[in-house]
């Protein structure tokens, strides 16, 4: 396997610890400030560039300098980094054939209940848009709306429900601030909603 050095920190007072791929497609690197013992003292002096920031690889699939490594560029606000990073599972990967998760079975009943609406939204940072997928919807027409967490309407467009109750679409996020948003899909028969985070 080919290895490339994207940066080095000889003689620095910190240790490099965990590197993780996040749901936004970037890789984050934590470091530990060796000038302080664990846990860090609860004083402002213990908030340093090293422990108050994460380093970021913006384009981990690109080689050498094109990966855009930015040391200590992601500020943790009131938090500090020790060793590790949180677990950020990626749920959109689908079934892992042959794994225990692929061996689940469902019993067959005489009276199968009516199936619930499937509604999924997720933010794609590369395309800067929210993707929307829905199925088993009732109705023929409706609208797709985006609200911020203060209830303000940010985006709206008319939609048509195709055979089988399917709706797919995108919500452009250009000029929209990072944060949590509520995606609402309403038809002439029902309404479904989902929260999505723009990072």
Image (cartoon, rainbow, N blue to C red):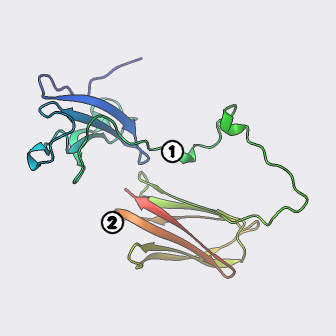
For the C terminus, the quadrant is bottom left
Other-residue count near label 1 (Cα within 10 Å), few / some / many at <14 / 14–19 / ≥20:
few
Rendered image quadrant of residue 159? bottom right
Residue at left offset 57%, top offset 64%: 169
Rendered image quadrant of residue 21? top left
Q: Position of residue 36 (x, y in %)?
A: 14, 34
Q: Nearer the viewer, residue 197 or 59?
A: 197
Look at the numbered discs 1 and 2 and tell me whether their residues touch, using CB distance below 8 Å. no
Q: Give the farthest residue toward the left.
A: 45
Q: Give how far apart the Cα atoms at labels 1 and 2 are.
A: 23 Å
Rendered image quadrant of residue 197? bottom left
- The residue where tag 1 is placed is 90
- The residue where tag 2 is placed is 177
Q: Is residue 63 left or right of residue 43?
A: right
Q: Nearer the viewer, residue 118 or 45?
A: 45
Q: Position of residue 23 (x, y in %)?
A: 44, 47
Decide which of tag 1 and tag 2 comes sooner along the chain.
1
Callout 1: helix, strand or loop?
Answer: loop
Q: Is residue 161 above or below residue 85?
A: below
Q: Give the farthest residue toward the bottom.
A: 188
Residue at left offset 55%, top offset 47%: 91
Q: Is residue 37 left or right of residue 100?
A: left
Q: Nearer the viewer, residue 58 or 64?
A: 58
For the N terminus, the quadrant is top left
Q: Give the farthest residue toward the right.
A: 110
Residue at left offset 41%, top offset 48%: 24
Q: Position of residue 165 (x, y in %)?
A: 72, 68
Q: Is residue 151 above or below residue 179?
A: below
In this rendering, which labeled residue sits more in front, label 1 or label 2?
1
Q: Is residue 35 left or right of residue 169?
A: left
Residue at left offset 18%, top offset 40%: 40
Q: Position of residue 33 (x, y in %)?
A: 17, 34
């Amino acid at each position: 396997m080919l290895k490339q050095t994207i940066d080095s920190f000889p003689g620095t007072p910190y240790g490099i610890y965990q590197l993780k791929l996040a749901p936004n497609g970037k890789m984050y690197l934590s470091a530990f400030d060796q000038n302080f013992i664990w846990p860090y003292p609860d004083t402002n002096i213990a908030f340093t560039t090293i422990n108050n920031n994460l380093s970021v690889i913006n384009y981990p699939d690109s080689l050498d300098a094109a990966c855009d490594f930015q040391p200590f560029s992601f500020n943790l606000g009131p938090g500090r980094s020790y060793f590790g990073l949180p677990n950020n599972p990626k749920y959109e990967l689908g079934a892992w054939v042959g794994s225990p998760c692929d061996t689940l079975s469902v019993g067959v009943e005489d009276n199968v209940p009516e199936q619930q609406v499937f509604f999924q939204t997720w933010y794609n940072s590369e395309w800067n848009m929210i993707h929307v997928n829905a199925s088993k919807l009732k109705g023929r027409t409706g609208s797709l709306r985006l609200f911020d967490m203060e209830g303000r309407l940010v985006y709206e467009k008319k939609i048509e429900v195709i055979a089988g109750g399917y709706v797919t679409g995108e919500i452009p996020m250009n000029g929209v601030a990072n944060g949590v948003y509520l995606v609402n899909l309403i038809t002439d028969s029902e309404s479904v909603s989902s929260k999505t985070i723009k990072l």
